Image (spheres, rainbow, N blue to C red):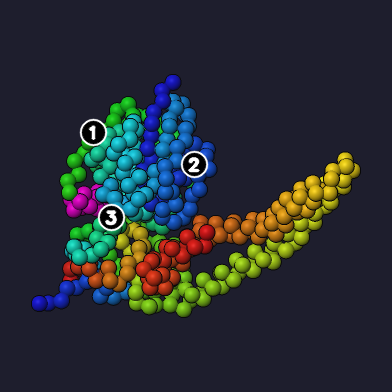
Amino acid sequence: MTELYTLDRLESGNEAKIITVLDTCSIKNRLFDLGFTNGAAVRALQSDGHGSLRAYEICGTVVAVRKEDAQKVALSI
Amino acid sequence: MKAIKVTLAGNPNVGKSTVFNYLTKMNQHTGNWAGKTVGCARGFFECEMGKAEITDIPGTYSLYSISYDEDVARDAIEKGDADCTVVVCDASGLERNLILALQIMSVTRGVVVCCNLMDEAKSRGITVDTELLSEKLGVPVVGASAISGEGMDKLCEAMFYAADNPSDIRECGDKEKTALDARTIARSVTTFADSKKRERERKLDAFLTGKYTGMLGMLLLLFLVLWITVFGANKPSELLTGFLFWVGSHLRSALVSVGAPEFVVGSLVDGAYMTTAWVVGVMLPPMAIFFPLFTLLEDLGYLPRVAFNLDYIFKRCGSCGKQALTMCY
């Protein structure tokens, strides 16, 4: 099984397209409402320095997502 | 005179309360962080077209609610008897804002879209074609900057127009479809230009939330705020207590001169009055300095950065960084 390319692995400063938020994500609905939808472009910004939280630019706004949640967001390569 | 009912809906932190305050001349607390309004606020305003009762509801990202304040919002939109629902949008983030607008249009009639923060968006190189947006959505769209009152007259007009000629229910399909529609529409009406301001914002953010600089900045600011509070309050505190004690001594002699018994003077002046005077004299000046300073930080948008910096600590106790702000209050 190939590993999924997920949001937490997107390098800071880079941009990618979202495929979907996995069902196992506890804040799936929230992320969806914030614009983490199929086809949306997301850019990774700075991390909080402890690796537990990172800011992302999506839909013209900056939102912070924790690592364990970012691991549940699938990106297209 | 005609009277209509209007509901103000929208994503968190798009300036709903600012629109509300401008129209009603009321003074709802506004703040630059998501979730400032948790209950519904009600107010009235009048313009040439008639009277309106306007309800400001908590910001919500979606009608499929997950938190209490979003429940409040959904109920107000779906079960309310408003003649017109104004969806306030942030012009800088139309793609996300339109998801809610489309959802609302699928459950209620008489929708008006208010594209707020237009000048803020403009300064960041983002322009929105409101006419084209109105065409695509099939509802009136008003561009506005509520803080300066720009576009508010047009918004009033649009509200009364929408109450008389309500737009039809627009099927929005499932969530995925709605999101896709929102993106397609937002992209077609928005133009982005390079902006130095966005670049600056990003650099500032990187500093304020940097691994070391973030913490350092936070501690420095905390120290500065406390220092200003403590030292700034010294003199006013002294003057205030002096004044209150002076009033107290006169109060005492007045009571004594009318022949009040010792225990009355003791309990009223030494007990009730002096205690209150002490508390007010010592507490009021620092509070009168601290809270405005805190409000300033809030309006600058610094608080979400604090939440970001502190999240990893709060996460350990099963909470989140936003909790830090509640603890400040």
* Magenta span includes B183: yes
Q: Is B137 situated left or right of B317 in this image?
A: left
- Residue B134 vs A16, above or below: the answer is above
Q: Main secondary structure of the magenta part?
A: helix
User: Which residue position holds label 2?
Assistant: B21
- Residue A28 vs B254, above or below: the answer is below
Q: Is B247 situated left or right of A17 in this image?
A: right
State the CA–CA distance, disc 1 to disc 3. Answer: 24 Å
User: Which residue position holds label 1?
Assistant: B168
* Magenta span includes B253: no
In this orientation, does residue B83 appear? Answer: yes
Q: Residue furthest left?
A: A1
Q: Inspect the image, locate mark 2, and give the three-letter code of the amino acid beneath it.
A: Asn
Q: Inspect the image, locate mark 3, and give the three-letter code of the amino acid beneath it.
A: Asp
What residue lies at 76% left-to-right and 48% top-to-bottom?
Answer: B268
Q: Is B328 situated left or right of B66 in this image?
A: right
- Chain letter behind tag 2: B
